[in-house]
């Protein structure tokens, strides 16, 4: 009898280890991302124009208002293919993992699509009339500020990077 009890205990333990392995295999880099560790950026340093290679432009004004042009959705919303333009507000937040720029679109003025395929896709959800992004604050190898968020499936780790506007 004792042999059967030990066998059941080993099976239960092995089953638990297999379940744990399956669960952790699904965990990507975003699940464990704790931030950049940057804590010394000021709101004045973040204020100004930002752009990315896709033609996105964001202006973070010193009065905490914002202008957004062609900004894609964050995380899984990126897959919907819409690009929002409008006005909103922003603030610089500091947490244990580092600083984050919180940008809120409060008045949408235009919606565009990243590709023609998403325009004709009737199953795509309606783009939001308001939206909120969280940009991680980081620095490049030249100590220049950059902002980014994860795009698409966050576990894959694709980043949407905003750099200071050229000539700014």
Image (spheres, rainbow, N blue to C red):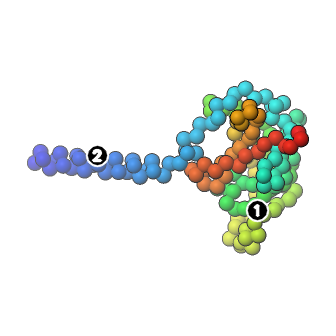
Q: In front: 16, or 159?
A: 159
**Which element is circle 2 on?**
helix
Q: Quadrant of residue 138?
A: top right
Residue 68, above or below 62: below
Q: Quadrant of residue 37?
A: top right
Badge 2: residue crowd in 10 Å (few <14, some 14–19, many ≥20)? few
Q: In front: 162, or 60?
A: 162
Q: Residue 83: give x, y in percent of width and height.
A: 78, 58
The residue at the point 84 percent across, 30 percent down is 44
The residue at the point 74 percent across, 31 percent down is 143
The residue at the point 58 percent across, 45 percent down is 30
Report the Cα–Cα distance between label 1 and label 2.
49 Å
Badge 1: residue crowd in 10 Å (few <14, some 14–19, many ≥20)? some
The answer, for residue 61, to whether it is visible in the render is yes
The residue at the point 12 percent across, 45 percent down is 2
Mark identifier at residue 114: 1
Q: In front: 18, or 127?
A: 18
Q: Residue 130: give x, y in percent of width and height.
A: 78, 52
Which residue is denoted by mark 2 in the rendering? Answer: 13
The answer, for residue 88, to whether it is visible in the render is no
């Amino acid at each position: 009898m004792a042999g059967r009890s030990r066998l059941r205990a080993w099976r239960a333990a092995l089953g638990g280890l297999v379940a744990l392995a399956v669960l952790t295999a699904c965990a990507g880099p975003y699940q464990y991302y704790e931030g950049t560790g940057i804590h010394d950026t000021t709101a004045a340093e973040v204020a100004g124009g930002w752009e990315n290679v896709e033609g996105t432009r964001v202006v973070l004004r010193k009065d905490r208002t914002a202008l957004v042009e062609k900004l894609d959705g964050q995380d899984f919303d990126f897959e919907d293919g819409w690009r929002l333009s409008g006005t909103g507000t922003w603030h610089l937040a500091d947490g244990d993992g580092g600083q984050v720029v919180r940008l809120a679109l409060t008045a949408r003025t235009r919606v565009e699509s990243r590709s023609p395929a998403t325009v004709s896709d009737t199953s795509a959800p309606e783009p939001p009339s308001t939206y909120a992004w969280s940009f991680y604050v980081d620095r490049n190898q030249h100590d220049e500020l950059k902002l980014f968020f994860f795009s698409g499936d966050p576990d894959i780790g694709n980043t949407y990077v905003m750099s200071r506007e050229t000539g700014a």
